[in-house]
Image (cartoon, rainbow, N blue to C red):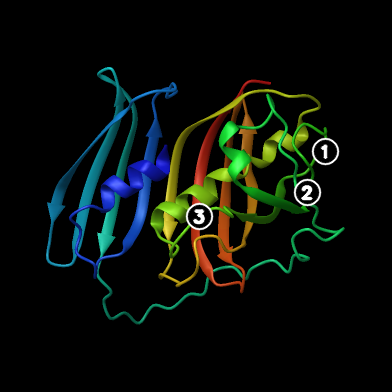
Amino acid sequence: MAAAGVRALCEDVPADRPMRWLQTVFAGPVPAGDARIDAQTLRAGGSATLREARLSVDGSVRMTATAAFGATRASRLDHAPPAAPAYPEPGSPQSPLIPYIEGVMPVFTQRTDMAFAEGSFPFTGQAARSHGGWVRMPEAIGPRDPAMITALLDVWPCPALQCLSGPAPASTMSWTVHFHPEVAGDAADWCRFRAETDASADGYHVFHAWLWDRDGRPLASATQHVAVFG
């Protein structure tokens, strides 16, 4: 759902203005069937473009997304992002692939590969604040783009779920993604992912996440606010 909104946001934006950040609000679930996405330009300045998209079903808004696109400019600031974790190779005994479990995992994860390298599986009752490993969409075709990066960030569950001792639903309420300088790569390549809890209380969970490519180059970071029903 978020990836579809990203593609709509990218329409009519000059190629020299990559996406810098994305803010999404999930107002309600999107049922199977037809959905409509309407996008518009809020402002197009000398070096930045601000776009907004709304996804609706039968006239009811289910998601809003706003994104900023900005041209590269000269700057004396240069702060390196966190280094990528040194995870074992995906599929190794230290980083096993996660099997799809019908009725427990989101349906779309059937088209993804995940390999745990840090933390525990969801609903195992482990008191940990972080988890991470590898993620990819093996059927993806073409170069990696903002929509693919957004989709890869969305695959892993929130780290708080590993603290629960049994299955419980969780629903994202808001999500902000910051894209780092574009790194060329194949859309089907493995990427490294790590998420860490900021706080959990009153049925809500806030966490930060990072995504790097296989070689450890940063692709994006995100902050997510999740309602956890358990």
The residue type indicated by label 3 comes to Ala
Q: Nearer the viewer, residue 5 or 157?
A: 5
Residue 86 lies left or right of residue 93; in this view the side is left
Residue assigned mark 1: 126
Camera-nearest label, 3 or 1: 3
Q: Nearer the viewer, residue 92 or 227?
A: 92
197 versus 204 height, above or below: below
Residue 101 lies left or right of residue 15; in this view the side is right
Characterize the local packing of mark 3: few (<14), some (14-19) or many (20 or more) Cα atoms within 10 angstroms. some
Secondary structure of residue under mark 3:
loop
Query: Which residue reaches farthest right?
Result: 93
Residue at image location 47% in from the left, 56% down from the top: 149
Tell which circle, 1 or 2, labels the residue nearer the N-terminal end: 2
Q: Position of residue 85 (x, y in %)?
A: 69, 66
Secondary structure of residue under mark 2:
loop
Q: Position of residue 220 (x, y in %)?
A: 48, 60
Q: What distance separates the C-alpha of mark 1 from that of mark 2? A: 8 Å
Q: Nearer the viewer, residue 211 or 104?
A: 104
Secondary structure of residue under mark 1:
loop
Residue 68 lies left or right of residue 123; in this view the side is left
34 versus 96 height, above or below: above
Residue at image location 20% in from the left, 58% down from the top: 13
Q: How many labels does the image show?
A: 3
**C-beta proximity under 8 Å, tags 1 and 2:** yes
Residue assigned mark 3: 140
Residue 178's quadrant in the figure?
Answer: bottom left
Q: Position of residue 162 (x, y in %)?
A: 75, 37
Tell which circle, 2 or 3, labels the residue nearer the N-terminal end: 2
The residue type indicated by label 2 comes to Gly
Q: Which mark is residue 119?
A: 2
Quadrant where the N terminus sits is top left
